[in-house]
Amino acid sequence: MRSFKGLVSILILISVFALVGCAATVPCWIDKGGACFSGDKKAFYGVASSSGIKDPSLKRTSADDNAINSVAKIFQVYTASLMKEYRSSIGKADTSEEIRNVEEGIKTVTSATLSGVQIVDHWEKPKTDELFALARLDLNLFKDNVENLKTLNDKAKTYIKENSDRMFNELDKEVKKAEEKGKL
């Protein structure tokens, strides 16, 4: 009887360890993006997800492409927004009926040619159909690629290469300030 209780206890412990080991820990980059890598060498990060797609390959490609697009948005994005609101009150003061309709449309366009963006991690949210992708563009690789851009004149290329470190450091300081204030 004693060995049976010991066996049951061991099985319970193994089950608990198995459940704890299987519990998914959400990677920091899911919520904070590139702010999780402030100690890393200089890079730009983009995070995106894809869900509702049954084909695993298509879902992964969609998440990857959206993460790369997220990196591109750091450099250039055009946004247009339109909001319409209609309100009406009909009736007497004590029996009036209010009607309200609010509509919003947002259009975001990103157009950039980026070389060297890599997908460096994936994470699938347990019990849902959402796959996250993390894209990374190394700052030094970005500066090297600026030289190969044919649409920029030499003056623009020089300016970007000379100021990219300074701009990255300013962005890093702003992220750290936001982290200290608890906004990230």
Image (cartoon, grey):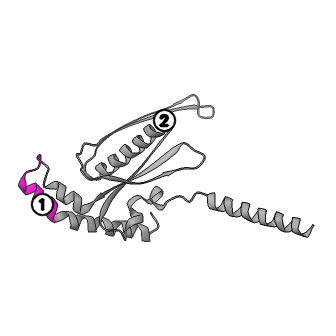
Q: Nearer the viewer, residue 80 or 184?
A: 184
What residue lies at 24% left-to-right and 45% top-to-bottom?
Answer: 112
Q: Position of residue 148 (x, y in %)?
A: 13, 52
Name the side, left or right, on which 89 lies relative to 39.
right
Q: Which residue is mark 2?
A: 55
What residue lies at 33% left-to-right and 46% top-to-bottom?
Answer: 69
Eye-nearest disc, 2 or 1:
2
- Crowd around label 2: few <14 · some 14–19 · many ≥20 (10 Å): few
- Crowd around label 1: few <14 · some 14–19 · many ≥20 (10 Å): few
Name the side, left or right, on which 123 lies relative to 76.
right
| Above or below: residue 128 compared with residue 156 | above
| Above or below: residue 80 compared with residue 165 | above
User: Of all residues shown, which one is farthest toward the left?
Assistant: 154
Q: Tell whether position 104 is magenta.
A: no
What residue lies at 10% left-to-right and 60% top-to-bottom?
Answer: 158
Q: Which residue is mark 1?
A: 159
What residue lies at 48% left-to-right and 61% top-to-bottom?
Answer: 28
Q: Are marks 2 and 1 in contact (CB under 8 Å)?
A: no
Q: Nearer the viewer, residue 128 or 180?
A: 128
Q: Tell whether position 155 is magenta.
A: yes
The quarter of the image holding the C terminus is bottom left
The three-letter amino acid code for the residue at tag 1 is: Tyr
Q: Position of residue 102 (x, y in %)?
A: 46, 35
| Above or below: residue 145 compared with residue 79 | below
User: Of all residues shown, which one is farthest toward the front?
Assistant: 3
**Magenta residues?**
150-162
Main secondary structure found in the magenta portion:
helix
| Element under disc 1 | helix
